[in-house]
Image: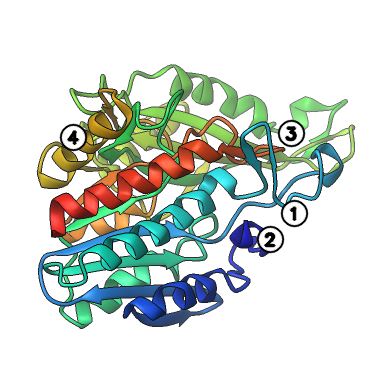
Amino acid sequence: MELIRRRSVTPDDAGCQQLIAEKLKPLGFHAEHLRFGDVDNLWITHGSGAPVFAFLGHTDVVPTGPVTDWHGDPFDPVVRDGMLYGRGAADMKGSVAAMAIALEKFVAAIPDHRGTAALLLTSDEEGTAQDGTRRVVEFLGRNNVKIDWCLVGEPSSLEALGDVVKNGRRGSLTGTLVVEGVQGHVAYPHLADNPIHASAPALAELCATEWDRGNEHYPPTSFQISNIHAGTGADNVIPGQVEILFNFRFSTALTPAQIQARMAEVLTRHKLKFKLHWQTPNLPFLTAAGQLFDAVRTVIKDVAGRDTVPSTAGGTSDGRFIAPTGAEVVELGPVNRTIHKVNECVSVADLETLTRMYERILGRLLA
């Protein structure tokens, strides 16, 4: 609840990381506050050497939306009927609190554990993700620190805590398509070239394309248009260009280069005058098996009595920056039904159970 009270709308940490560092300091944790640009990051550790187990989380939250639509102040947490309400309760201050308490209990019980127990927090996961976990991974690399196991606290569960864990994520490739036309008066279309009309058949084909069929670990690649902008604002002017923002969520069945080439072929075949601007892709990652996934699956069964299902569906997470270092990465967190919504909430009982799960996972790997 103290974390939720801090209005940490991305990329503002609003003192959340300091709160966690102060909580863990009496147990001998060492905290490194790493600020890159406008982003606060925290790397906090107990013990030394390998193996390194790291919890990964973020203290920033998305904007609240219309405050009047909430039951109360989104940053004034309240428990009602067993649910904790507040922005970030599920995504992901609940997990951050569970991680901190699990570390606290684990170290109090086993102060001479093997290896390193760590917590990495950033404040720009909900933002550009340029100066957060990405930069901390670079910092750790320069200091010869290699994470062996990374447990991300993103809200992975669908209906009940632990029913689904993320053992990977699809890649994400965003781009902007600009199609050129000729501006003119709507009453004289023969003197103009409407780029919206010209691009529509190509966009329809792109939307209908089967890019791949996925594979045993990933669903098929998807193409989605997220924004179309054109025109002067006047209803009697044919626009001179249209700008289209789009995104691919792709599996390991395709590479970014293959996607880019296939899209350019479609646009060229439709004889469009176009420019494509691509953002740096986020590549897919997968932890199909290993000590971390086995520990997570076993603990969920022991604590919650249910068999978990691995999944790579959904959006991206900061695990994409950890996986390329060779670490095993798994995501386990609360039910995600209300994340980014008005009246975001999480079950208090689930947070207590999640804390026990996190502590037991630590015990299986570092005790």
Q: What's the residue type where badge 1 is placed?
A: Asp
> Crowding near pointer 3: few (<14 within 10 Å), some, many (20+)?
some
**Does any portion of residue 181 appear in the rendered image?**
no
Q: Confirm or deny contact between disc 4 and disc 1 (CB under 8 A).
A: no
> Crowding near pointer 4: few (<14 within 10 Å), some, many (20+)?
some
Q: Which mark is drawn over residue 192?
A: 3
The CA span between labels 2 and 1 is 6 Å
Question: Label 4: which residue?
Answer: 298
Residue at 79 percent across and 40 percent down: it is 70
The CA span between labels 4 and 2 is 34 Å
Q: Confirm or deny contact between disc 2 and disc 1 (CB under 8 A).
A: yes
The CA span between labels 4 and 3 is 65 Å
Mark sitting earlier along the chain (2/1):
2
Q: Secondary structure at mark 2?
A: helix
Q: What's the residue type where badge 4 is placed?
A: Thr
Closer-to-camera residue (189/48): 48
x and y, in percent, of residue 275 in the image:
50, 47
Mark sitting earlier along the chain (3/1):
1
Question: Label 2: which residue?
Answer: 5
Q: Is residue 197 above or below residue 66?
A: above
Question: Label 1: which residue?
Answer: 76
